[in-house]
Image (cartoon, helix red, strand yellow):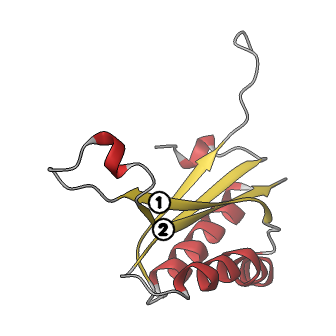
Amino acid sequence: MIFVEDIPENGLIIVSVLFNGYKHNFQNDSRRNLLKTLPNLIKEKCGVQLVPVQFSLIRSIERTPDMSGRESIGRARTVGVEYRYRFEHIEKEEFEEMYKEVKNYCSQRSIWRDYDIMLTDYVGEINE
């Protein structure tokens, strides 16, 4: 957990969502929502530019107790997606507003059952 006072001016915000069930369109709809719709909404409402830098699928290994380790290899399905966004020159108040908007956006999507919003900062020198 990071305290509001420690929010970096530049960094990455990671939005990770899990699907509410599984349908063939969930993956593509989620990718589109997180690639364009969310950054555009945040820019419009908060004035913060979120630049998408990485998209990842979240996969779950389907395994039953009677399967050997070799049998379960390759038997995975996509259960969610994750987007990483870069932000720069953000003030504390802007971050708080942005976080609330991202949280509100994620909670209103019916195809997502759960979500996480994480913040990362760049690692500097050990002796800084």
Report the disc number at residue 7: none
Q: Is residue 127 left or right of residue 75?
A: right
Give the tally of numbered discs.
Answer: 2
Q: Quadrant of residue 40?
A: bottom right
Task: Kindly identify the residue that appears in the image at 83 percent across and 68 percent down.
Answer: 49
Q: SS for tag 1?
A: strand
**Quick one: 15 or 22, which is closer to the camera?**
22
Task: Kindly identify the residue that appears in the image at 48 percent across and 68 percent down.
Answer: 78
> Is residue 17 in view?
no
The picture places residue 79, in percent across and down from the top left corner, at 44, 68
Q: SS for tag 2?
A: strand
State the residue position of label 1.
59
Q: Quadrant of residue 74?
A: bottom left
State the residue position of label 2.
78
Single out the residue that lies furthest toward the left: 66
Q: Earlier in the sequence, mark 2 or mark 1?
A: 1
Check if mark 2's residue and mark 1's residue have beta carbons within 8 Å.
yes
Q: Please state which amino acid type lies under the numbered disc 1.
A: Arg
Badge 1 crowding class, 10 Å Cα cut-off, few under 14, some 14 to 19, many 20 or more, is some
Badge 2 crowding class, 10 Å Cα cut-off, few under 14, some 14 to 19, many 20 or more, is some
How far apart are the two marked residues, 2 and 1, measured between alpha carbons? 4 Å
Q: Is residue 24 left or right of residue 101?
A: left
> Is residue 105 in view?
yes
Q: Is residue 59 left or right of residue 11?
A: left
Task: Kindly identify the residue that appears in the image at 41 percent across and 48 percent down.
Answer: 73
**Quick one: 21 or 72, which is closer to the camera?**
72
Q: Is residue 94 left or right of residue 48?
A: left
The picture places residue 64, in percent across and down from the top left corner, at 20, 56
Q: Is residue 29 above or below residue 96?
A: below
